[in-house]
Image (cartoon, rainbow, N blue to C red):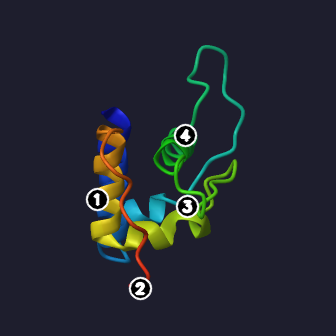
């Protein structure tokens, strides 16, 4: 459920204004070494893990280790498809949504 909420928010960020701070933060990542006692994961690591979970049954989409925006942005830009994918993540028994033929 947490992954679905995070991915739902990610979809809202993609559909939002192009100049929003949240949208600019999608591609921002700090690659500094973590100090002892600090979290091992960056926010981007969590996003990559959730994207892989979301697209596990979609063979056309492969998420690389960096969560490259080029791999998933097209799917996220199609609002109804993205919402259906996130709903499918919450209910695995539901059928996988059909991939759109036209993209925004």
State the residue in front, 40 or 92. Answer: 92
Question: Dot 1, how many residues are within 10 Å of its Cα: few (below 14), some (14-19), or many (20+)?
Answer: some
Q: Determine whether the residue tagged by mark 3 lies in a helix, strand or loop.
A: loop
Q: Which mark is residue 83?
A: 1
Residue 33 in percent (x, y) is at 72, 33
The CA distance from mark 4 to mark 2 is: 27 Å
Q: Which residue is mark 2?
A: 102
User: Which of the marked residues, 2 or 3, is nearer the chain's N terminus?
Assistant: 3
Marks 4/2 in contact by CB < 8 Å: the verdict is no
Q: Is residue 89 left or right of residue 56?
A: left
Could you tell which of marks 1 and 3 lies nearer the N-terminus? 3
According to the image, label 3 marks what residue? 27
The answer for how far apart the CA atoms under marks 3 and 4 are is 16 Å
Q: Is residue 13 above or below residue 89?
A: below
Q: Where does the N terminus fall, quadrant-wise?
A: top left
Is the residue 12 above or below the residue 44 in the image?
A: below
**Which circle's residue, 1 or 2, is located before the other in the chain?**
1
Residue 39, placed above or below residue 73: above
Question: Which comes before the other along the chain, label 3 or label 4?
Answer: 3
Number of the front mark, 1 or 2: 2
74 lies left or right of 1? right
**Residue picked out by circle 4:** 49
Whichever of callouts 4 and 1 sits on the residue coming sooner in the sequence is 4
In 3D space, how far apart are the residues under numbered discs 4 and 1 (Cα atoms)?
Answer: 18 Å
């Amino acid at each position: 459920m947490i992954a679905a909420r995070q991915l739902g928010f990610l979809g809202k960020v993609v559909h939002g204004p192009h100049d929003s701070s949240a949208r600019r933060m999608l591609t921002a990542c700090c690659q500094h070494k973590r100090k002892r006692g600090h979290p091992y994961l960056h926010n981007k690591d969590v996003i990559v893990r959730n994207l892989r979970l979301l697209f596990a049954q979609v063979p056309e989409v492969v998420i690389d280790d960096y969560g490259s925006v080029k791999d998933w942005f097209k799917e996220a830009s199609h609002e109804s498809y993205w919402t259906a994918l996130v709903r499918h993540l919450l209910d695995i028994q539901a059928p996988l949504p059909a991939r759109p033929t036209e993209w925004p």
